[in-house]
Amino acid sequence: MEKLYGNAIVGQSGGPTAAINATLAGVIRGAQTARDCGEMETLYGMFNGIEGFLREDFCDLLTVFDEEQKISDLIHTPAAVLGSCRKKLPSDPKDEMYDRIFSLFSKHNIRYFFYIGGNDSMDTVAKLSRASAERDYEICLVGVPKTIDNDLDGTDHTPGFGSAAKYIATTVEEIIRDCSVYTVPAVTVVEVMGRDAGWLTAASALPSLVFGEGPDLVYVPERVFDVDAFLSDVKAALARHPNVVVTVSEGVRNAAGEYVGSLGQSGTTDVFGHKYLAGTGKVLEQLVREHIGCKVRAIELSLPQRCAGHLASATDLAESVRVGQGAVQTALEGGTGCVVTILRNDGAEYGITIGHSDVNAVANRVRTLPETFVNEAGNGVTEECLRYLLPLIQGEDTPRYVDGLPYQFKLR
């Protein structure tokens, strides 16, 4: 493909994170440089992802972000400033919806398309790439990774995960401190996000590596959840001390492959076929109450895991910006049908390199915890796992505060 010249457009899709706007800031910075060098006209931002694009609902981001302070505020703002969607595009690359999309690309002279998101968003980029091959319109389509679940394949880790991991590890550390003040036997079950992969729940054990004290038990989707083994584990932990803290992924399943938290759930799914999950902690709370009889409570960390911008990882924010800039550079070099990746450098000192790979090798695939990251009993994670996680939560990069509250940038 010859070097293209025209406009670029970027969107955000899927669940928000504390760092997705930092990635957007990286795309904006990359586009500013490209414009100043005569390689690109401007960068549009589509509101609510591909849905907004189909409505021609977008703004000129290079006009909006005309000051460095605005970009700095954007980096420190959680959630998705452009809004999000979970729209699933048709599987047939000849579908008329793609005719509409590519006619809009042509109408607005869009030659670079960036989509920030997770597995389902990469599915969108992959489908657009296949549709592009059916049409006579040159455009570079680049997926930009984002997910707190850290389950995107082909990359060492994903932007957004480090900040979520930092929040979870910190919150669990504080919960352990709170629970330790009483002598009455009690069990606290902390439910953590993670449908198919236990990366976030594994991060809850980081206090044990740093301070020698973490959750007593950790359960992840990579291991079959056995109720009898769970109750036995809890009883053994209570015999050691009265204040037991358990962390569990929302997506743990039994031997039949059923979600433990499916009891009482509606079974409703989203457009990508994912069941809405919640209640795993409550199910375990009830099991402890019925079979052990001690004081017990369940805590669902819920949305703060992905929107706690006040406790973001400085490493995560810096890498997220680099990933956004890398996406622009990849496109300018002719990369299309690809996704930006983070490669961990060899050696004892932590460092990364930004790369890219074929989006078709990434879309709709789930990267789970390696076997060596979960202990033999299936109720904890290994030191190898924690040492992989630790560099990702390093550093504090606090937002700008106004009258005691963090300032958050808004486009609308």
Image (spheres, rainbow, N blue to C red):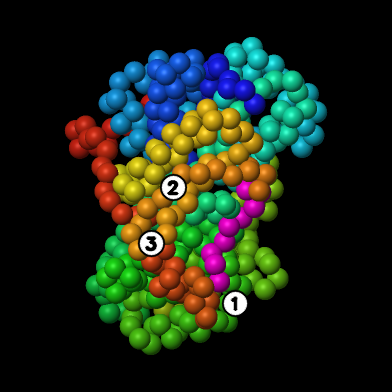
Q: Which mark is residue 353?
A: 2
Q: Secondary structure at mark 2?
A: strand
Q: Quick one: which residue is furthest to the left in this view? A: 403
Which residue bears the numbered disc 1?
A: 226
Q: Residue at x 37, y 47 (%)?
A: 316
Q: Provide residue 160's location: percent of width, then percent of height.
A: 43, 46
| Residue 330 in view here | yes
Q: Is residue 10 above or below residue 257?
A: above
Mark 2 belongs to which amino acid?
Answer: Thr
Q: CA distance from mark 2 to mark 3?
A: 13 Å
Q: Is residue 187 above or below residue 173?
A: below
Q: Quick one: which residue is furthest to the top in this view? A: 107
Tag nearer the camera, 1 or 3: 3
Mark 1 belongs to which amino acid?
Answer: Asp
Magenta stretch: dominant SS?
loop
Q: Residue at x 54, y 67 (%)?
A: 370
Tag nearer the camera, 2 or 1: 2
First of labels 2, 3 by sequence position? 3
Q: Provide residue 247's location: percent of width, then percent of height.
A: 44, 67
Quarter of the view holding residue 30 = top left
Which residue bears the numbered disc 3?
A: 347
Q: Residue at x 44, y 68 (%)?
A: 385
Range shown magenta: 362-371
First of labels 1, 3 by sequence position? 1
Instruction: Answer whether labels 1 and 3 touch (C-beta < 8 Å).
Output: no
Q: Provide residue 22's location: percent of width, then percent of height.
A: 39, 37
Q: Residue at x 45, y 84 (%)?
A: 235
Q: Secondary structure at mark 3?
A: loop
Quadrant position of the N terminus in the picture = top right
First of labels 2, 1 by sequence position? 1
Q: Provide residue 13's location: percent of width, then percent of height.
A: 55, 36
Instruction: Answer whether labels 2 and 1 touch (C-beta < 8 Å).
Output: no
